[in-house]
Amino acid sequence: MTRQTGIIITVVLVVLVACPSIFCCLFGAISTTGQVPFTMNGQTTQIPNAVGVVLVCLSLIGLLVPVASWFFLVKGKTA
């Protein structure tokens, strides 16, 4: 695998994995503060804080995928 192929794979992973993870992290951070209401069966309640913490943790793991792919596929290879 060439360096150019590794860069293309990393860019695709950034678009497909890192961008949604950033939005998930933001939503998790906002829901941790208790500012996100949701309605179920006609009743409005708050999303539990634990849901926000889980979303933040999962999104941070999702952000590591493009970094790991860059490290293993691109770093250290010459043109």
Image: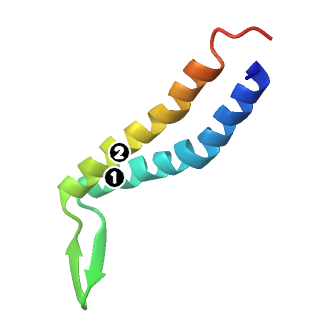
**Residue at (56, 19) in percent of width and height:** 71
The residue depicted at 78 percent of the width and 24 percent of the height is 4
- Asked which colour scheme the image uses, the reply is rainbow
Residue 33 seen by the camera: no
The answer to whether residue 18 is seen in the rendering is yes
Q: Is residue 47 above or below residue 33?
A: below
Q: How many marks?
A: 2
Kindly identify which residue carries mark 2.
Answer: 58
Outermost front residue:
1
* Quarter location, residue 9: top right
Q: Earlier in the sequence, mark 2 or mark 1?
A: 1
- Using the rendered view, name the quadrant where residue 49 is placed: bottom left
The local crowd at label 1, few if under 14, some if 14 to 19, many if 20 or more residues have their Cα within 10 Å, is many
Query: Measured from the top left, where is residue 41 in percent x and y?
Result: 24, 90
User: On the rendered structure, is 11 left or right of 18?
Assistant: right
Q: CA distance from mark 2 to mark 1?
A: 10 Å
Disc number for residue 15: none
Describe residue 79's horizontal placement relative to residue 63 as left or right.
right
Q: Is residue 41 left or right of residue 55?
A: left
Q: Which residue is mark 1?
A: 28
For label 2, the SS is helix
Q: Position of residue 66 (x, y in %)?
A: 55, 33
Residue in the picture at 75% in, 29% down: 5
Residue type at mark 1 is: Gly
Question: Which residue is painted at 63% across and 22% down in the image?
Answer: 73
Q: Within 10 angstroms of label 2, few (less than 14), some, or many (20 or more) residues? A: some
Q: Is 76 on the left-hand or right-hand side of 29?
A: right
**Please, is residue 39 above or below residue 46 in the view?**
below
Q: Nearer the viewer, residue 33 or 16?
A: 16
Q: Is residue 34 above or below residue 71?
A: below
